């Protein structure tokens, strides 16, 4: 295990225990989420060292790596994903005025990049999991590399970089943000989707909230903390957008963790309640943050 001594956002060295959370998905181990007493950033501390993290993903039930279609929950996930792929394409297309080169970091089995390739985009992916990476190559003939190979990309290579529920998994967080800044073209667009630890469903489910997903999720962002983090490295927040389907999926898993069984009615109701609460506060279960960067503003 390794322990962070300083907050990655503000540099403060004072943390308070926020929650003790069990890994309900796989290992059943317990982990501690702390809260920075200065800026409020929440993160896992201590946490597994990077070389140990891989074992916490080794399950056929980890759907983004296995693309599992068995069971009602996984089938629902597949249906929703197919619908949202088109939405994501339209969103990205409307955010840029020129250029059609995209890098998806954490591309998993490649469905998102394949959607863009259909429309003539030049697509590249980064995926740390070997089996997911090979699946993307085999099924869609995509250009996908490992994290270690990211350094081979030339500076200012991409018009768009995306991370869909990936940033919270990255152990080398600051190095990754600097690498994104290097790879993105001047005035390029970065889209980062993360769970929102200040959402209604996070408060409602507490330690059972599925989006804590310890120890796979190392950080638990809020709209304020993710904005502060990226501003440090020259990024400017353009807009924040909701991912409304996530409230239902997260509630479905959270119900199972809390009650020991799946309850579709309660999950739907709590997902609906989360979206209703967020409609006024703009504080949905998961959020998409759209950033732009001007290279002259990057902090060295």
Image (spheres, rainbow, N blue to C red):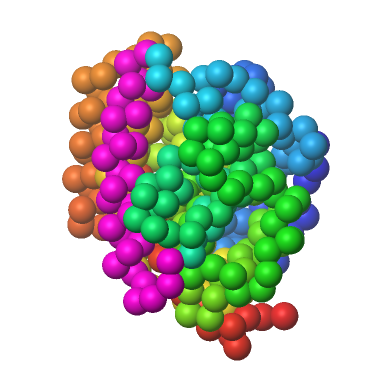
The image position of residue 7, as x and y in percent, is 68, 59
Screen quadrant of the N terminus = top right
User: For the stretch drawn in magenta, what is the main secondary structure?
Assistant: helix
The image position of residue 147, as x and y in percent, is 70, 49
Horizontal side of 162 relative to 229 (left or right) equals left
User: Can residue 209 be seen at all in this image of the molecule?
Assistant: yes
The image position of residue 174, as x and y in percent, is 68, 62
Query: Foreground residue, 200 or 149?
Result: 149
Q: Compared to 240, does 147 lie above or below?
A: above
Specify whether residue 74 is painted magenta. Answer: yes
Horizontal side of 278 relative to 176 (left or right) equals left
Residue at the image position 50 percent from the left and 55 percent from the top: 123
The image position of residue 190, as x and y in percent, is 48, 65
Residue at the image position 43 percent from the left and 66 percent from the top: 100
User: Can residue 181 be seen at all in this image of the molecule?
Assistant: no
Q: Which residues are magenta?
A: 71-100
In the picture as drawn, the residue positioned furthest to the bottom comes out as 296
Specify whether residue 10 is painted magenta. Answer: no
Residue at the image position 34 percent from the left and 37 percent from the top: 81
């Amino acid at each position: 295990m390794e322990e962070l001594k300083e907050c990655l956002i503000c540099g403060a060295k004072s943390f308070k225990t926020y929650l003790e959370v069990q890994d309900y998905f796989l290992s059943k181990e317990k982990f501690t989420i702390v809260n920075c007493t200065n800026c409020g950033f929440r993160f896992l501390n201590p946490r597994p060292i990077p070389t140990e993290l891989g074992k916490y993903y080794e399950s056929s039930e980890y759907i983004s790596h296995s693309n599992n279609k068995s069971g009602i929950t996984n089938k629902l996930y597949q249906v929703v994903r197919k619908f949202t792929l088109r939405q994501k394409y339209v969103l990205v297309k409307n955010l840029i005025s020129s250029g059609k080169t995209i890098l998806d970091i954490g591309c998993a089995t490649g469905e998102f990049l394949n959607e863009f390739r259909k429309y003539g985009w030049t697509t590249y992916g980064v995926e740390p999991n070997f089996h997911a990476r090979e699946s993307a190559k085999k099924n869609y003939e995509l250009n996908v590399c490992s994290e270690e190979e990211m350094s081979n990309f030339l500076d200012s290579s991409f018009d768009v970089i995306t991370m869909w529920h990936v940033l919270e998994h990255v152990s080398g967080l600051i190095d990754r943000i600097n690498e994104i800044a290097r790879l993105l073209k001047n005035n390029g667009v970065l889209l980062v989707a993360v769970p929102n630890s200040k959402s209604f469903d996070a408060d409602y489910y507490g330690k059972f909230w599925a989006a804590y997903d310890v120890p796979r999720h190392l950080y638990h962002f809020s709209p304020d903390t993710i904005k502060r983090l990226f501003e440090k490295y020259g990024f400017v927040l353009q807009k924040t957008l909701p991912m409304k389907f996530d409230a239902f999926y997260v509630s479905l898993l959270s119900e199972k963790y809390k009650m020991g069984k799946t309850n579709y009615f309660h999950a739907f109701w709590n997902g609906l309640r989360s979206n209703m609460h967020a409609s006024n506060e703009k504080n949905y279960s998961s959020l998409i943050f759209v950033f732009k960067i001007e290279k002259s503003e990057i902090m060295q």
